[in-house]
Amino acid sequence: MLIEENGLDADGDGTPEQAALDTFAGHDVDWAAGFPGDFTVELDGVAVDLERPVRHRARFEDGRLVTSHVRPLAESLDVSTGTVTARAYDPTYFVAYDVPETPGISGRGDCSLVREEADREAAEEEYGEQLAEVDASSDPFEVVELPDIGVLFADSFVLTCTASS
C-alpha cells in the first residue's frame, strides 16, 4: 500500500524503481515540529537532544521497503564519564521496531557496546495488564492513554568507555 500510495512503482511490476525510492527517502520521517522521533539517547538516564534526521536512504529488499537515516547529536557527549543508552521504539507501541544487528563502534578502542534484549514475555504480560485496566464499557473510539508502553519492548544499546589518559 505504501508503494502504491506514493507512486513508487511506475511500471506496476511490483518492484519500486530506485529513482522513485531516492525521491521518497526522508518523507517517512517528515515529522511535525516538536515530535522527537522514535529513537532515544540518554547519558546516565538523562535524555540527550538529537537533531532532525539527515542522510536519508530507501531501498526495496526481500519484498519490504527499508528506509534509514542518521540522527546526529545536538551536542557532543563526553562518553568517558558516564553510560550512554540508546533505544529505537514508539512510546505508544503502534509501530514495532527491530534493530537486526548490534551497532558498531568506531573511533575509540576503549569503548564497548552491549545489547540488552527486552524481555518480550514480561513486556507482553505488562501490556496485557495495562490494557485490562482500561474500562471496556467506555466509548470504543475513545483514545486510551497508556504510559510509555513501547519502552518495555525495546532493546537497549549500552555504551561504556574508559577515561582516556
Image: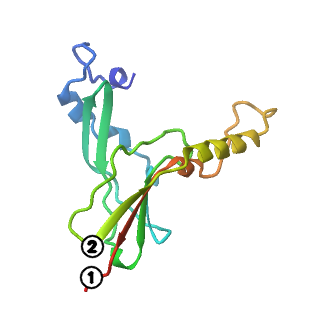
* Cα distance between the residues tagged 2 and 1: 8 Å
Residue 12 figure quarter: top left
Q: Residue at x 28, y 16 (%)?
A: 14
Can residue 156 be seen? yes
Q: Quick check: 140 left or right of 74?
A: right
Assign the N terminus to one quadrant of the image: top left
| Lower sequence index among marks 2 and 1 | 2
Q: Which residue is drawn at 54% across and 52% down?
A: 151
Which residue sits furthest left? Answer: 19
Sort mark 1 into few (<14), some (14-19) or many (20+) by Cα contacts within 10 Å: few
Q: Position of residue 20 (x, y in %)?
A: 22, 28
Q: Closer to the camera, 24 or 87?
A: 87
Can residue 78 be seen? no
Q: Do the residues labelled 2 and 1 touch (CB within 8 Å)?
A: yes
Q: Quick check: 105 left or right of 97?
A: left
Tag 1: residue type? Ser
Residue 112 circle label: none
Tag 2: residue type? Asp
Residue 160 figure quarter: bottom left
Which residue sits furthest right? Answer: 137
- The secondary structure type at the circle numbered 2 is loop
Q: Position of residue 18 (x, y in %)?
A: 19, 29
Name the residue that disc number 2 marks: 110
Q: How is this picture coloured?
A: rainbow
Name the residue that disc number 1 marks: 164
Assign the C terminus to one quadrant of the image: bottom left
Q: Closer to the camera, 57 or 99?
A: 99
- The secondary structure type at the circle numbered 1 is loop
Q: Closer to the camera, 157 or 142?
A: 157
